[in-house]
Image (cartoon, rainbow, N blue to C red):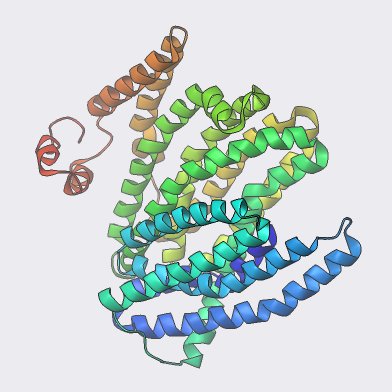
Amino acid sequence: VVIWGWFEIFSNFGLNTFLTREVARRRDEANRYLVNTTILRLALALAGLPLLGGFLALRQLVVSPPLEADAMWTIGLLYGGLFFSTISTGLTALFYAYEKAEYPAAIQTISTMLVASLGVAALLLGFGIVGLAAVSIIVSGVTLAILIGLTIRMFFRPRWEFDLRLQRAALAESFPLMINHLLATLFFRMDIVLLEAMTSATVVGWYGVVYKWIDAINVIPSFFTQALFPIMSRQALEDRAALRRSYVFSVKLLSLISMPLAVITTLLAYFLIGLLGGSQFLPHGAIALQIFVWSIPIGWINSVTNYVVIALNRQRTLTWAFVVGVVFNATANLIFIRYFSYRAAAVITIFSELVLLTFFYLVMKPALGRVPWVRVLGRITAATALMAAATWALAQVSVPLALAGGIAVYGVAVVLLRPFDAEELGRIAEIMPERVRARLAPGVGIGE
């Protein structure tokens, strides 16, 4: 799966982000961008075949034990499915460009259910990991068929429109996006690699189960920023002031969710780790989660800031931010893991996110101006502090009481402290049911 992930990043080459950004600005050229980026995707997937063969041959010679036949078949089947999935990735980017993010989300849910149900059937029938890989190809084919059908029905029927000049421009623009993706992947998993090298499999197990919850939580900013990206891409070209307002509003909205979520996860960490991993992962898995989860408020801001920088066509500069982040993460972990084990890795993740945010902000600032962070986040942070204090006090009595009381205190604090101004409150009201919208009129309580 890890090997397949590398080649998936290579075949995608950042072209999905490029496609979303450009089509969001020029919908009349959607077919040209879709067709030519798809040609590039398939060409890159083909180019990866000899690279994969060479890598596997070298691994079989120098790494002990070598991969078994089933593993080799699995890698081959997964790579075959890559030809379906890479086209699907491009079509998904098209839906984001047309601001129809709900369709990819629904299709992903269907795909996940199919993989789970067919995967269980394959295992029960004795096909093992090869059967799971075959299921992956089948589901990829079904997903692609659904996306093609919806594209024809909702947007246009793709037609041949070869443009070599566009392909060259796409590769030049997308290459730093691909490098950034690789560096981001390395950034978010460096600690696991170093823990494995410097501690034990037991420690890696404690820490690994934390990532399962963090990955699940991070679905929220991922979908949010991808849905927002086409809007920001147009604003970057047409109205920088509107882009700045969208950025500040997004930071507030994500922080409004991420900060209390970190408090709740800290409270429920023992339950969550026990639920997913069992008692053998306690207490250390819970301690790691309680620390690690405080990286998400910064990480979620990084998620939207990253896409703002890409919308501004500054992805090449962004690469250096990821390089600095990876170097800081690796160096700090190499120094401190030997003394503080997984606790160091979790704390360093928080500081690594802060390093990334600092560099992202420095890249973004010349285009959007200074962001008044205290004014933007101060009231939400204060509400979170009140929630944390109430949660800690009530946890001495009962965890369920602490959960309910903490959420109640946070809600009241947000209403009283008014973190959103009138314009932002109006944007929130637009997506609310009409009855709720009337209650959220500016001046009622949570607008400035």
Left or right relative to 322: residue 37:
left
Q: Quadrant of residue 335?
A: top right
**59 to 272, vertically: above or below:** below
Residue under the image location 38 percent in, 14 percent down:
401
Residue under the image location 79 percent in, 68 percent down:
56
Between residue 317 and residue 430, name the one nearer to us: 430
**Quadrant that contains the C terminus:** top left
**158 to 23, vertically: above or below:** below
Check the image and name the residue furthest to the front: 125
Q: Quadrant of residue 208?
A: top right
Between residue 231 and residue 204, name the one nearer to us: 204
Number of numbered discs: 0
Left or right relative to 92: residue 345:
right
Could you tell me residue 141's position as x and y percent?
Answer: 48, 71
Could you tell me residue 316's position as x and y percent?
Answer: 56, 67
- Is residue 326 in view? yes
Residue under the image location 40 percent in, 57 percent down:
110
**Quadrant that contains the N terminus:** bottom right
**187 to 276, vertically: above or below:** below
- Is residue 362 in view? no
Left or right relative to 214: residue 404:
left
Could you tell me residue 40's position as x and y percent?
Answer: 54, 82
Residue under the image location 18 percent in, 42 percent down:
422
Could you tell me residue 278's position as x and y percent?
Answer: 61, 27
